[in-house]
Amino acid sequence: MQKYPALRALVEQVRQKLGRDFDRWIERTAEPVEAAGYDRAFAGLTRSLGELQERIRRNQERVRARYLDLPDQPPGRQRTVLDNSAPQMLAALSVALMRRSYRQRFGSVTRSLELAALAVEAADRVAGTEYLSRESAADLQAEALAHRANAERLNSRYRAAHRTLAAAERLRAAGTGDRHLKATLLHFRSALHDAEGRVDKAARLLDREIAVRRLLGNDHELGQALIDRGRTAIWTGSLPEASRYLREGVLRVGDPQLMLLALLPLAEALARDCQGILALEVSCQANSIIVMLGEKGQVLRRHTWIKALAYRALGEWRGAEAMLLRVREAFATEGLGHLAGLVSLDLACVWAAQGRVQDLKRLAEEVHAIFLAEGVEERARAAFLIWLQAVRAERLSEELALRVANFFVRSQRDRRLRPDR
Amino acid sequence: MTPANGNDPERPRPGSPEPHADREAGDGMTQEEFRRRVELAQERGEPISELVRSFVIATIDEVMRQFDEE
C-alpha cells in the first residue's frame, strides 16, 4: 500500500464512512490476492472504491435535487415524502437534514430543531430496513439524535438534550465504533455542559475531542473544537492561553463564520474586564466580517450584546442601553429567558450608573421572575439575591451592579469562582 | 428598541463607519482595506476565507501585543 498514497487516502475515507461494514465490503468486492496478484488486486479495489464513491455522490445529488425544499414543506407533505422514499435516499436525506440543522445554529434555533427532528425520523426509518447493517444504522441514528440534542440545547431545553444525548450514546455503543461519531458526540456534549455553566467539564470534553480529531486529521473540525476550547479557556484559564487555542483554531478552520466566532469571546472578555477601547476595536474588526458575511440571527445578536458591553465600559450609556434593550427583546421573543435575564443584569449596570432607581426596581422584579422560572446555578443565585436586595433598598451602585453581572456570567461558566474573589 | 419599520440604527451596514474604523490591524490592514479587498475578491469570484483568516489572526495578535504591553 506504500506505493499507493492516493489509494490509501481513498480507502481510509471509505473505511470511516462504512466502519465495521468496510471489512465485509472488502470480502465481497476484492479479488483474492493470491489468485490475482497484488497489483491486479489493488487495481480492482481502486475501481470498486471509485464506483462506491460515485454511487454515494449520485445519491447525494439526487437528494439535493429532489428534497431541496423538503424542510420548508408542511409536516403532512414531509410525512408523505418519508413514507415513499427508498432507504438509500432516506439515509442521504437524514445526513442532509443534519447538516442543514447544524447550519441553522447561527440562524433560527427553532428551525434547527425542526430539521434535526426530521433527520431523526429519516434515520429511524432506515434502521427499520435492511439497507444498512444494524451497526451502521445505529451510527446513523446516533448522529441524528446528537444533532437533535444540539438543537434542543440551542433552544435552552437542557434536560431534553441530556436525555437525547444519552440515547445517542447508547446507539453509538451498539454501532460500528466510528471515531468521527465519537468526536461529534463529545463536541455536542461539551457544548451542552458549556451552556449549563459547567465550563470545566466542557473543557475536559473538548480536550478529548481535540485528541480524537488530531488522530483523525480532521482539520476543520479540529479547528472548530480549538476555537471552542479557546472560549472556555477565557473563563477557566488566561487570555494568553485562550488566544493560543483561538489562533490555532482559526488557522485550521475553512469557514469564515467560524473564524469570526474566535473574535467574539475575546471581545467579551475584554469588555467585561473594562478594557473598553480594546474591546471595541475587536468588536469593530468582527463587525467588518459580520457585514461582509451578511450575518443575522444569533451571531449578530451576540455581537450587538458584546458591542454594548464595550460601549458601557467606555461610559457610552445611551448606545449601550439601546443595544441591550434590543438584544434582550430578541432573546425574550425567541423564548430564551435565561439569556434575556443575563442581558438585563448588564442593562442594570447602565441604569445604576445613571441612578435610575425606579427603572431598576421594575427590571429587578422581571429578572427575579425569569431566574425563578429558569433556575440558576447556586452561587449565582446567592449573588443575585444580594443584587436584588440592593435594588429594593435603592442602594445598587454601578460598581456592585457590574461585579454581580460579571460574576453571574462567569459563575455560569466557572464553578471555581466565589463571590469574594 | 428596534423601530417598527425595521430600520435598526445600531445594526452594522456596509460602508457605515465604526469608531476606530481606520485603525490598523497587526498586518497593517485597516477595516476599510479589508472591505475593499473582500469586494475585489468577490468580484473576481475568489474565495475570501484566506483574507478573513489573516484579518482575524492579525486581530488576535494585536490584542495579545497590547495585553503584553500592559
Image: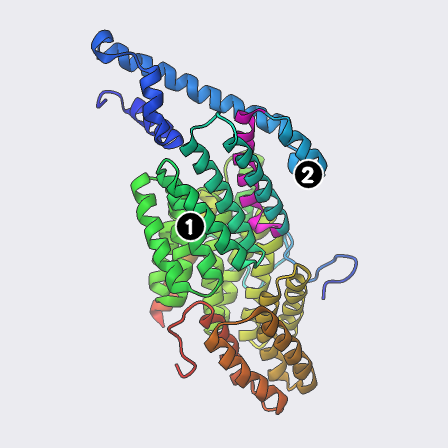
Q: Do the residues indicated by labels 1 and 2 lie within the same chain of the protein? A: yes
On screen, residue A371 versus residue B58, left or right, reads right
Residue matched to label 2? A72
Residue under the point 72% across and 66% down:
B1
Q: Is residue A340 left or right of residue A52?
A: right
- A103 w.r.t. A315: above or below: above
The residue that label 1 is drawn on is: A187
Circles 1 and 2, Cβ within 8 Å, touching? The answer is no
Q: CA distance from mark 1 to mark 2?
A: 28 Å
**What main secondary structure does the magenta stretch of the protein show?**
helix
Q: Position of residue A10 (x, y in %)?
A: 35, 25
Give x and y (percent) for residue B7. Answer: 74, 58
Residue at x 61%, y 50% (from the top left corner): A107
Q: Indicate yes or no whether the magenta region holds residue A93.
A: yes
Q: Which residues are magenta?
A: A86-109
Left or right: residue A13 versus residue A332 is left
Which amino acid type corresponds to the residue marked 2 in the rendered image? Asp
Label 1, secondary structure: give it.
helix
Host chain of mark 2: A
Tell me which amino acid carries mark 1: His
